[in-house]
Image (cartoon, rainbow, N blue to C red):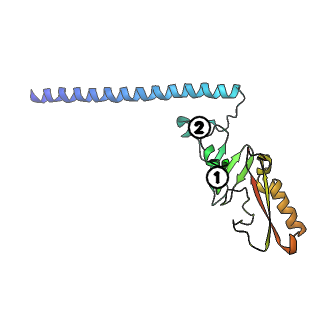
C-alpha cells in the first residue's frame, strides 16, 4: 500500500513539475511572439518613413542573436560596425566633448553608408598606409592641418585615401613636393561631421 501511495505522490509531483515547465515555456514563446510582432511593426514603420533599415537587426535583442558580426576590416583598430544615426554605437564614433561638442573616437574604424572611416591614435581621419602623426611635430616637417565638416572628413569617399586630404597627400607624394627648405609635408585630416568654421 505504501508503494502505491509513494507512486501516486511522485506521479503528482512529476505532473506539477511538468505543468510549471510547460507554463514557463508557453510564457517564453508568447514573449518571443509578441516581440516578433512588435519588431515587424517597427520595421515596416521605418521602411514606410524612408529610414535606413540596413542596421535594423543589430538594434534589437531578439534579432541581434541572428545577425553575424562583420569581420574587422582594419586590424589594430576597434571596429564599431555599420552605423546609422539611430545606432547605439554612435557614441563610440562621435564621442561627447565638453569643448567641441563631440570629436571622433580614437583608433576606430566604422562604415557610414558606403564609406569606410578610420581614425588614428589622435582621433584624426587616416588610412592604414598613412604615415603616423605625432602631436609634437618634428623639425623636418611642414604640417598642413585641414579643418572642416563631413566633406573634409570624407563623406562620400569610399575610404580615407580617397577623401580630399588623402588626395592632397597622394599628389604631394607623387609630385615629390616639399615644404619650405625641403621639409617633408604632413597632412592632418581634422574634419569631423557636423563641424563648421566656428
In-front residue for pair 139/92: 139
Residue at the image position 43 percent from the left and 29 percent from the top? 28
**Looking at this rendering, what residue extends furthest in the left direction?**
1
Image quadrant of residue 52? Answer: top right
Residue at the image position 66 percent from the left and 43 percent from the top? 83
Residue corresponding to mark 1: 105
Q: Which mark is residue 49?
A: none
In-front residue for pair 197/178: 197
Question: Where's residue 134, x and y in %?
Answer: 69, 66
Question: Where's residue 115, x and y in %?
Answer: 75, 48
Question: Where's residue 37, x and y in %?
Answer: 55, 25
Q: Is residue 175 above or below residue 80?
A: below
**Looking at this rendering, what residue extends furthest in the right direction?**
175
Residue at the image position 73 percent from the left and 55 percent from the top? 125
Relative to 26, 19 lies left or right: left
- Quadrant of image for the N terminus: top left
In-front residue for pair 145/124: 145
Asked if one can make out residue 70 in the rendered structure from this viewpoint, the answer is no
Question: Where's residue 23, x and y in %?
Answer: 36, 26
Mark 2 or mark 1, whichever is nearer to me = 1
In-front residue for pair 115/124: 124
Residue corresponding to mark 2: 59
Q: CA distance from mark 2 to mark 1?
A: 21 Å
Image quadrant of residue 39? Answer: top right
Relative to 56, 128 lies left or right: right
User: Of helix, strand and loop, which one carries label 2?
Assistant: helix
Sooner in the amino-acid sequence: mark 2 or mark 1? 2
Amino acid at each position: 500500500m505504501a508503494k502505491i501511495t509513494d507512486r501516486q505522490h511522485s506521479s503528482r509531483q512529476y505532473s506539477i513539475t511538468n505543468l510549471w515547465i510547460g507554463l514557463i515555456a508557453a510564457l517564453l514563446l508568447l514573449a518571443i511572439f509578441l516581440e516578433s510582432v512588435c519588431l515587424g511593426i517597427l520595421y515596416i514603420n521605418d521602411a514606410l518613413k524612408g529610414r535606413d533599415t540596413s542596421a535594423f537587426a543589430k538594434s534589437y535583442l531578439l534579432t541581434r542573436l541572428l545577425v553575424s558580426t562583420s569581420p574587422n576590416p582594419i586590424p589594430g583598430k576597434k571596429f564599431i560596425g555599420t552605423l546609422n544615426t539611430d545606432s547605439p554605437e554612435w557614441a563610440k564614433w562621435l564621442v561627447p566633448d565638453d569643448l567641441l561638442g563631440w570629436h571622433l573616437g580614437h583608433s576606430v574604424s566604422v562604415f557610414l553608408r558606403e564609406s569606410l572611416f578610420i581614425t588614428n591614435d589622435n582621433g584624426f581621419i587616416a588610412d592604414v598606409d598613412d604615415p603616423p602623426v605625432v602631436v609634437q611635430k618634428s623639425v623636418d616637417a611642414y604640417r598642413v592641418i585641414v579643418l572642416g565638416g563631413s566633406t573634409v572628413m570624407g563623406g562620400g569617399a569610399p575610404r580615407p585615401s580617397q577623401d580630399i586630404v588623402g588626395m592632397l597627400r597622394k599628389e604631394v607624394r607623387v609630385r615629390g613636393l616639399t615644404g619650405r627648405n625641403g621639409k617633408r609635408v604632413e597632412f592632418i585630416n581634422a574634419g569631423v561631421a557636423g563641424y563648421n568654421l566656428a
